[in-house]
Amino acid sequence: MESDGPGRVDLAWVYSFTQCSLSLSTLRTGYDTLCVEGRRTARRDTELGHSNTELGHSNAELGHSNGVRASPRVYTVRRRDARNVKGRTHVTTRTRLVAGLTAGAVLLAAGLFVAVRLVIASLNSAIPQADLFGVALPSASGSPSASAAAQPPANTPPEGADITGPLNFLIAGEDTRENEPGSIPHSDAILIMHISADLTHAYITSLPRDMLVNVPAYGPSGSGADFTKITHAMTYGARVPGGGQNTAQGFGLLAQTVTGFTGLEFSAGALVSFTGLAKLADAIGGIDIYVDHDVTSIHRGPDGADTVAQGGPFAHYPVGSQHLEGWQVLDYARQRYGLPSGAYDRERHHRQIVKAMISKIFSFDLMNHPFVAAYVVLTVGQYLKLDLRGRSVEAYAYALRNLRPENVTLVGLPGSSVYSGGSYIGESLAPIQASYFAAVRSDTTADFLAGHPELINDPR
């Protein structure tokens, strides 16, 4: 259920697309049959009209041969009857063709509706929804199945029509080494997306992974309270008493820690692994991004291979517009050394990557082409955990249908390093962060940023 590069195609996607194509092909065959039958009927009726006309002429000639003068009135009537037969032929032909076209259109529309509903049902089930916030809520959509294709009553509003803003989403990038069993999870990327009350504007900001915060005690993992780097909240929360790691459980403690710092309650959350980030980028055909500083990797070579042991060569990302494929997106997101502001520049790159992905996904016009969404979701589903607090993917897709990439603003909160006894211990955001999050809580973010344009760092 995954695509590992340009050479492999997701089998689940091929199956879904084939099923839809077969359905449409069947409908088209039926439609063509209706048209052929209409043409055959037209030919038969036309031939009948010619036969009746010829019959009129034959009768007239018969009258002359018997010495009886054919009545012009009768002949005229016969000619008129012949014309009426031809008229009925055209009317019958048009009627049947229109009926065929109408029936074909109705069947085609019905088939598309069923196909779209089935794809959306698979989309809802492809991403595992987990209890990331530690408060289990019943699913609003139930278990997706083929019954989702049934058309709801005409007076039923679309799913998601009742979702109102403002909304706050918490997104965490998980730095667990999937190829290393027992690896301790960290949250290397922490992003907060605020969506305005009218659901048309979004604001994305980041919290430094090394930011010093109060991490509360957490019952599920048995961890105590601590003042430490925020990345450790995921580590502490993921511990399973008796052994093992549970990253979804770790997200719960991270969410509580972020809420304690910002005062924000979250409408939904997402946890994505680094592998998932690369696969998502590949699934959508890569992303286009503006590189604002020269970046040289310390991990990968120009072809994506690990070149650390050999001491290089290393991949380089020059200033300017660049198209990045999956491994490059991940590599670019990890770099901080050699950048003017170190980790803060890296976090800005995280925000740029998220916006670039939003832009690319929106470019597919998913509301009209949901098959693309199914492919993307099936590709990254196992690397992504969602908690939509009881709502479905379909519901949020509908609710946010009017959100456009150009209305997504990237916000960078300034900060600085903290030292103790000459040793580095973490990061601290500048006091303006409190005012920013107050504006988010009151949904006055646009007004606040209008007075603080220096916080907007969205290069080109």
Image (cartoon, rainbow, N blue to C red):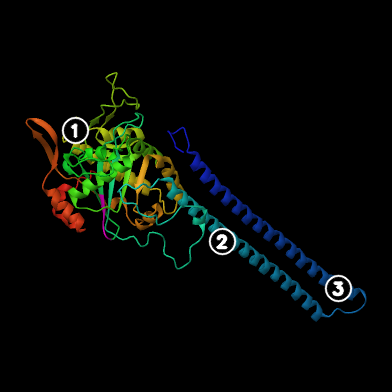
Q: Position of residue 79 (x, y in %)?
A: 77, 74
- Can residue 188 be seen here? The reply is no
Disc 2 marks which amino acid?
Val
Which element type, helix, strand or loop, lies under badge 2?
A: helix
Task: Say the numbered circle drawn on residue 117.
Answer: none
What main secondary structure does the magenta stretch of the protein show? Answer: strand
Labels 3 and 2: the sequence-earlier one = 3
What segment is highlighted magenta in the picture?
193-197
Question: Which quarter of the image is occupied by the C terminus?
Answer: top left
Disc 2 to disc 1: CB gap under 8 Å: no
Q: Position of residue 145 (x, y in %)?
A: 50, 52
Judged from this view, the residue extending furthest toward the front is 242
Which residue is at 44% across, 48% downward? 125
Which mark is nearer the camera, 3 or 1? 1
Q: Position of residue 340 (x, y in %)?
A: 16, 34
Labels 2 and 1: the sequence-earlier one = 2
Which element type, helix, strand or loop, lies under badge 1?
A: loop
Which residue is at 85% across, 70% downward? 58
Task: Name the residue beneath numbered marker 2.
Answer: 106
Q: Position of residue 182 (x, y in %)?
A: 33, 31
Q: Give the alpha-carbon distance from disc 3 to disc 2, as whole Å.
A: 48 Å
- Can residue 261 be seen here? The reply is yes
Q: Is residue 436 magenta?
A: no
Q: Give the alpha-carbon distance from disc 2 to disc 1, as whole Å.
A: 59 Å
Task: Name the residue beneath numbered marker 1.
Answer: 339
Task: Name the residue beneath numbered marker 3.
Answer: 59
Labels 3 and 1: the sequence-earlier one = 3
When the figure is inspected, residue 97 is found, relative to residue 245, above or below; the finding is below
Disc 1 marks which amino acid?
Leu
Front-lying residue, 441 or 259: 259
Which residue is at 47% across, 34% downward? 8
